[in-house]
Image (cartoon, grey):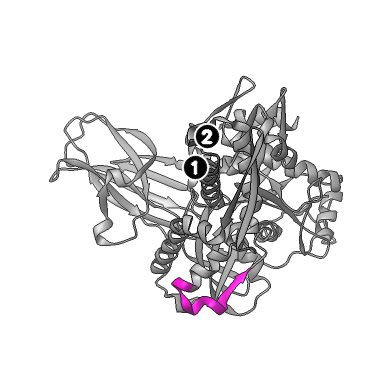
Amino acid sequence: MIYDIGIDLGTTYSCLSIMNATGTPIVVKNNQEHDTTPSVITYDNGEFCVGETAKDQAPFAEITVEAVKRNMSEADTWRINIGGVEYGPIELSARIVRKLVDDFIEKYPDAELKSATITCPAYFGPKEREATRQAGLIAGFEEVNIIEEPTAAAISYGLKSTGKKNILVYDLGGGTFDVTIMSIDNNRFKVLSTDGDCNLGGKDWDAALIQIIKDKICEQANITMEELEADKDVIADIKSKAEGQKISLSTLKEVKGGIRIGTSTVRYTVTREEFEAATAGELQATMMKIDSALESAKLTIDDIDDFVMVGGSSRMPQVKAGLIATYPSCESKILLHDPDLAIATGAAIYQNTRDVVVETGTDGQPVGEADAKLSKFAPKIGDIEIEKVLSHTMGVKVWDESQQKYLISNIIFKNRTLPIANKGEYYVHKDGQTALGVVIFQSEFEESDENLEVAEEECEEVGSFIVDIPSDSRAGEPVQVSIEANDKADIICTCTFRDITKSHTLSAKGLLNDDQIRNARRYLVG
């Protein structure tokens, strides 16, 4: 049986959803009958463990890996030695996906793994999206589709809504934050703008609470922070208690706890007021992203019909209170939409609408047992039209003769509807030049005349390639560089000099090649 599988690959928790026989998305519980699975990996005594058991044994394991999703931007450089083998974010994320798949197969042994849709933050660039896709391939899928988390949540929400409206998806997950503004018209979803921070999420609220507890314990026990942090068992106990206490502070005005240090127990109390004061900066950072997204979409807060809140951390009372304090008119529009599961179910719905090639006979019926089952199992819910936007501005490094320094010449800008393409006209720098070095940068600059050329230090290099040219080149000869982004957000840069043209696609830079993916898959799946 071929199922429509959607996966929310989260920083702290992950989730798998499928379309059932009536075309309704359902979440497949893990082997401990929970909807979500901790994105935690441990290694001890030569064995890997993933999920809830890994989370339980994390304080005592030889190696524990958490929040690996935050390292996807460094998928080409970040490595950790586990059992004498170097692992990167792609291979480790694949283990989390595989855990979800294994638990799914236990419940659906007739499942045939073909393709899946895996979600990623809207603010992920080409490298992170490709890293996510490769993790899914290693985990056993033949094809992996990528969709942005806010878009998946909007699909889950939007199919229960009718008519035309503008929505703002506020997605505060465990490790990332996204705000996406969309226009929904029945099954048509148009992204108007997106913004966010790949290093802002519930983990930062956890860290703030942990610090409050540590400060209180040091004061009560009359010990230094260095002495406290030297006791790894105590620190592990604090971290374990803090996660539950953060959840409790969503309903209680204060929480009490005790930590065993030596032969005595040090007791402490944390109030919601203290916690919210310590995390006011993080909350304000999300509001600033909302302002930026509204400006990009050329909308005001009054143009938004619904605020769709997703991501487990959006449950915190201070989030709703902060939104109301900042945007008073939004109070009646805030909707907490299945924050833990909406992204996964939206991904399953999206997977259900993907094009499926079914061979038919002369009678028009599917040929082949698998195709016949597919056609009967999950009725297609109808076409979903999605218009996406570019998440980052893209440009190339050029020499500015008047300023005698390098600048970044921006060619295509963030929050413009995909597909998008544009070109810039440049020149050979000196006589006899035999090569053109094209260095590609991304940034957060909005489209404006003053942002056509910007300082190099305000941008991030994401790729480069060399174009060989004849030695009879002359200074001032024209060079054309174009950058295009397709509806999958792949970035293709093309350089043309005379009749010489060379193109470069960013998404594969520095990541795993086909042989490495096959070998990693063989090792993990068999």
- Kind of residue sitting beneath label 1: Lys
Q: Point out residue 417 in the picture as x, y percentages from the top left corner.
A: 45, 62
**Dot 2 alpha-carbon crowd within 10 angstroms: few under 14, some 14 to 19, many 20 or more:** many
- Specify the segment rendered in magenta: 325-336
In depth, the one of 315 and 221 nearer the eye is 221
- Residue 345 visible? The answer is yes
The residue at which mark 2 appears reads as 511
Total residue callouts: 2
Q: Earlier in the sequence, mark 1 or mark 2?
A: 1
In the displayed structure, 72 sits above or below 391; it is above
Taking the magenta stretch, the answer to whether it contains residue 452 is no
- Residue 365 visible? The answer is no
**Dot 1 alpha-carbon crowd within 10 angstroms: few under 14, some 14 to 19, many 20 or more:** many
The residue at which mark 1 appears reads as 127
Q: Point out residue 220 in the picture as x, y percentages from the top left corner.
A: 54, 44
In depth, the one of 256 and 293 nearer the eye is 256
Locate residue 55: give its quadrant.
top right
Residue extending farthest to the left is 402
| Distance from the alpha carbon under mark 1 to that under mark 2 | 8 Å
Residue 469 image label: none
In the displayed structure, 94 sits above or below 354; it is above
State the SS at label 2: loop
